[in-house]
Image (cartoon, rainbow, N blue to C red):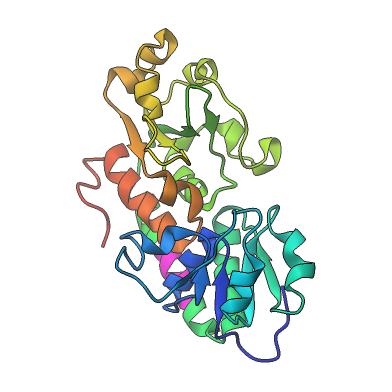
Amino acid sequence: MVTLEAPAVRVVCLTGLCVDTMFVLGIKPVAAYDLLHLDPAYWGPEENEIGAISGSFFEPSLEDIARAEPDLVIGLGGVHEGLRPGLASIAPLFIVDPIGVEGMLAHVIEVGILLGVEEDARAAAAAFEARLGEYVSRVTTKRSVMVVYGSDVNIGAETVCTPAIDALARAADYYEEFTDCGVHGAFPSFSVEQLLSIDPEVIFVQTFGFGPEPPQPVSEQLVDNVIWSELQAVQNGEVYEVDFFIWGTSRGIRGTNFVLDEAMPKIYPELFPTPLP
């Protein structure tokens, strides 16, 4: 946590989590590296007030950050700590890396305090807890679920370190080995063979790619894999490709609600023919 002489007004976001939290609090960042703010789930593709930060995710342009004249810069743990010396003459750097739902909600309140909107932040956190509780309370028999990701046939498994997966794991039967964040860390390696040993009823797949052309969905790349074809989720048509941009990078209240609203009707179509209001 950083200490500010006055509430921050001009915030630069270097991570999607920051964009998500600013959206939840109803405040636009003055600039952002992450393009999450252009997603229809946030301000949308027509948004043109949030300045762009060039460079790479690991080395965003200090010149662009300075040009935005921020009084707070929010970056991601394990990625942006090294920017602190370069930002010393520009603005304080607040590093965030929430673990699970509790970490996410604590983060929202911390940012709310820094922006002088603590009451709004606490209200947003309480509203999310109530909505998640409503989803969970309606489920009487949990179905088994796994969330995997990758750009090719070499897949990884999501754990409850990610807030959205933690939320989902409370309403579904998530593989026990990945419900303890301390066992594997956030993004453990995984394999189709391991997935078959679990054989979940429902599988969500995040396909990511960083080139100019959209990547071929991982589930399509695996279609001829004999082991993949033995999975009950594959045989029953319950493998779903999902948006990596939101599922994998938002990590905030808005993104987690998006994940729940997309996943729960697919896992429990009879209970949730449509998402909760």
Report the residue at 42% width, 25% height from top.
200
Quarter of the image with the C terminus in it:
bottom left
Viewer-side residue, 250 vs 182: 250
Residue 251 versus residue 210 in the image, above or below: below
Residue 168 at least partly seen: yes
Q: Give the side of residue 103 with respect to residue 202, left or right.
A: right
Q: Find the magenta span and give its range.
A: 122-130
Q: At 52% from the left edge and 48% from the top edge, which residue is drawn?
A: 166
Q: Is residue 128 magenta?
A: yes
Query: Depth check: 19 or 254 in front?
Result: 19
- Name the residue located 54 percent from the left edge and 56 percent from the top edge: 101
Residue 110 shows in the view: no
Q: Residue 61, position in %: x, y? A: 62, 64
Q: Between 103 and 135, which is closer to the camera in this rendering? A: 103
185, above or below 26, in the image = above
Q: Give coordinates of residue 57: x percent, y percent.
A: 59, 54
